[in-house]
Every structure is written in structure tokens, then in C-alpha cells.
Image: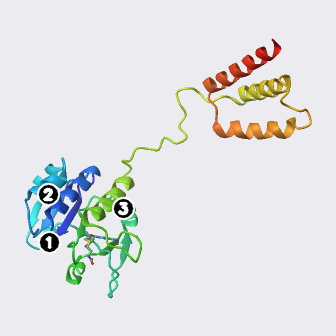
Amino acid sequence: MLSNFKVVLVETSHPGNIGAVARAMKNMGMDQLRLVSPKLFPHADATARASGADDVLRTATEYSSLQDAIADCRIILGSSARDRTISWPSVTAREAAARWQGCTENVALVFGRENSGLKNHELDLCHYLLRIPCDPDYSSLNLAAAVQVVCYELFVASGQEYPSTIGDQGDEPLATAEQMEGFYQHLQQTMADIGFLHPERSKSIMRRLRRLFNRTQLDTKELDILRGILRFSQNHNLK
Ligand code: SAH
């Protein structure tokens, strides 16, 4: 999955960042790392920061120029935090993920130096500028953090994230309308029996209670419990 996406780091200064990039990639199921003239690599700091993603470091390939690193790629995205004086066409990380996650061609995701980013002549080799939207007054992310965001967007766009469990029902089937009606009758009767419900106010209170319980989408087991409580309080009241 996503193996056609090549993360290309240009002249990274801190080996620790290379390790952190490997980790960020592996978290998102990616393993294709290309290094253009890294200052210090291999290095113990890289391995330490990779923290289990050293296989990504081991298989990383080194190049002496960006041209060589992207030679087999058909789509080149150069990521940059800076607003450039010359304007390149730009996409956000999310737009890029939506647009290219399904493509089968090699896509290069190029990241610049920690202190000075990508040079203009390097961006000239790119089809699009890749932007991670953030506070314009402080827009430069740490290199590995930038790689993380881009790889995360690709991961999500490729449909590999776990679906959310909000709104999932458990194993029990939801209560039917008839069962809910029986419950509301029972509830109203019990509230009257225990002297809680004044006949004049019963309509509006019942409507609110219906709204409350309908919002929660009770299942049959939950309904059984509630009806058990109602039965218990009715019996208790009669004693
Ligand atoms: N000081 C550098 C930024 C270096 S951060 C500069 O002025 O450009 C290292 C790399 O992380 C950048 O070259 C870029 O590839 C990536 N990066 C950091 N923040 C980013 C952002 N907001 N959008 C896209 N890429 C970003």
C-alpha cells in the first residue's frame, strides 16, 4: 500500500530527523525513503529516533542529487512552508492525498532542509508546491512533523483508517417502535402511580422524555432494564 509514494529528504542536517521521518512513515504504512546527500547518515541518532522503524532506514536509498532521486517519478510534489515570490501551483496535503492516493505512478514527496527548506531551482523540478496549512505567522513545521502530516493524509485518504465507532450499536437489536411505545406507556403510568406526574403537565413532560430516549436509540436489552426499574418502583409504591 502506498509504496509508489517516495518520501525524498533533501540534505537533511540532523540524523535524528531522518529517524523520526522513518517512524512517521512506518506509522502510516509507508516505507519508501530516499535521501539526497544527508549530512550524517547512517547515524546512531537516526536509529534511536526511528524507534523500531529501522527497516525503513535500512532500505532507504541515497542519491547525490534531487534529479537522480526523482528520476523514476511522474508526479513531483515539493513541500514548502514559505510563501514564494514566484508562485508555483500549490495544493494542500489533504488535496494532494485525495487527488493522488489511488494513482499507480511513482509520486515523489520532496522535503527540504531544516534550516532553509527547498531552493527555488529544486522547486523548479516539482509539479506542485505541497502546503500544510497552519498559522501564517509560524508556519514552519519540524521536518518529521511535516512528513507525518502528509503521510497521515495519504493514509486516511487511502481508506485504511479504522472506521469510527460513534453510533455503533452493541450486539442487541435496537428497540422497535412498538416496544418503545410500550415503554412510554409504562413510564407514564409509573410516574402517575408514584405521584410524580401531574395530569396537566404530563403531555409536555412525556414529549421531552420521548425526545430524550429517542435520542439515545435504546436497544432491547436497555429497554428491558428500564422496564424492570419501572416495575420495581410500581411494586414498591404499592406496598
Ligand atoms: N526554515 C525552512 C523550513 C524548514 S522545515 C524554510 O524556511 O523553508 C523542513 C521542511 O519541512 C521544509 O523544507 C518543508 O519541506 C517541510 N515543511 C515544514 N513546514 C511545512 C508546511 N507548513 N507545509 C509544507 N511543508 C512544510
* Image x and y of residue 115, in percent: 21, 75
Q: Earlier in the sequence, mark 3 or mark 2?
A: 2
Task: Note whether ligand 1 is within 8 Å of mark 1.
Answer: no
The image shows residue 62 at horizontal and vertical percentages of 9, 64
Q: CA distance from mark 3 to mark 2?
A: 27 Å
Residue depicted at x 81% and y 38%: 205
Question: Left or right: where does residue 235 sit relative to residue 63?
Answer: right
Q: Secondary structure at mark 2?
A: helix
- Locate residue 230: give its quadrant: top right
Assign ligand 1 to one image quadrant. Answer: bottom left
Please name the amino acid that badge 3 sits on.
Answer: Ala
User: Is residue 83 positioned above or below 108 on the image?
Assistant: below
Query: Is residue 174 toward the left or the right of residue 124 in the image?
Result: right
From the image, tell me which residue sits under label 3. Answer: 97
Residue 11 got which mark? 1
Task: State if disc 1 and disc 2 touch (CB < 8 Å).
Answer: no
**Spatial separation of the CA atoms under disc 2 and disc 1:** 14 Å
The furthest residue to the bottom: 85
* Residue annotated with mark 2: 46
Q: Is residue 239 above or below residue 103?
A: above
Spatial CA distance of label 1 from label 3 is 25 Å
